[in-house]
Amino acid sequence: MTATAQTLQSNKDVAKRLASEVFSQGNMRAFDEIFANGYVNHTMPVPGVPGTKEGFRQVVLATRAAFPDVHVDVKEVVAEGEFAVFRDVVNATSRGEFMGVPPNGKRLQWTEIHFLRIVDGKIVEHWANFDQVGILRQLGVIP
C-alpha cells in the first residue's frame, strides 16, 4: 500500500471505530484515542452541550444511557484525502430519558450519515445527519 492508500484505510478504520467501539461498545478509551483535543462538532447542537470533544463525550454518554443496547451497523465507508464518510443504521431500545423524553421501552431504528475530517489518525471535525423525525416518532413525541 502507498502512504496515501494507508492513510485512506486508516481514516476508514477511525470512522468504523467511532461507530463500533465508541457508540456500540461505549469504549471511552477508544473515544480518547480517535478524537483530537481541538475537535469541533458542526452537527446541530444539543442544548447546553458545547461543540467540543468534551461536549461530544457528553452526547455519547447520554445516548448510551438512554439506549444502553445501542448498535451502530456501518453500511458503507468512503475516504478521500482527510475525510471519511459513513452511512449507518442504528438499532436501540429506549431504556432511559433521551433529551427530556422519558423511555418507552420500544425498539427504535434510524439512519445516519457522518462526515469526518481526520488528521494524524484523530477526528478534528464532524458533521452528521440523522433521522431526527423518525427518532421522535418512535419515541412517541410526534405522531
Image: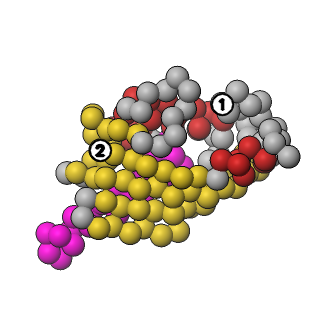
Task: Spot the residue most to the top.
Answer: 48
Q: How far apart, in angstroms, are the residues tagged by discs 1 and 2?
A: 25 Å
Kindly identify the residue that appears in the image at 67 percent across and 33 percent down.
98
Which SS type dominates the magenta stretch?
helix
Task: Spot the residue most to the right.
Answer: 143
Q: How many marks?
A: 2
Q: Give the residue pinned by disc 1.
A: 99
Kindly identify the residue that appears in the image at 78 percent across and 48 percent down.
138
Q: Point out residue 42 in the picture as x, y percentages from the top left corner.
A: 42, 42
Left or right position of 126 against 7: right
Kindly identify the residue that appears in the image at 37 percent across and 33 percent down.
53
Q: What crowding class fits label 1: few (fewer than 14 Cα within 10 Å), some (14-19), or many (20 or more)?
A: few
Task: Spot the residue most to the bottom.
Answer: 1
Relative vertical location of residue 141 with respect to residue 55 in this rendering, above or below: below
Q: Point out residue 119 in the picture as x, y percentages from the top left corner.
A: 22, 51
Q: Quadrant of the N terminus?
A: bottom left
Task: Tell me, yes or no, if residue 16 can be seen here.
Answer: yes
Task: Tell me, yes or no, if residue 72 can be seen here.
Answer: no
Q: How is the image coloured?
A: secondary structure
Q: Point out residue 62 in the picture as x, y percentages from the top left corner.
A: 57, 32
- Pick whichever of labels 1 and 2 is earlier in the sequence: 1
- The amino acid type, in three-letter code, at marker 1 is Met
Q: Give the residue pinned by disc 2.
A: 124
Left or right position of 64 against 77: right
Left or right position of 93 against 37: right
**For residue 72, what is the image quadrant?**
bottom right
Kindly identify the residue that appears in the image at 59 percent across and 38 percent down.
63
Label 2: which secondary element: strand
Highlighted range, magenta? 1-26
Q: Point out residue 107 in the picture as x, y percentages from the top left corner.
A: 76, 50
- The amino acid type, in three-letter code, at marker 2 is Val
Label 1: which secondary element: loop
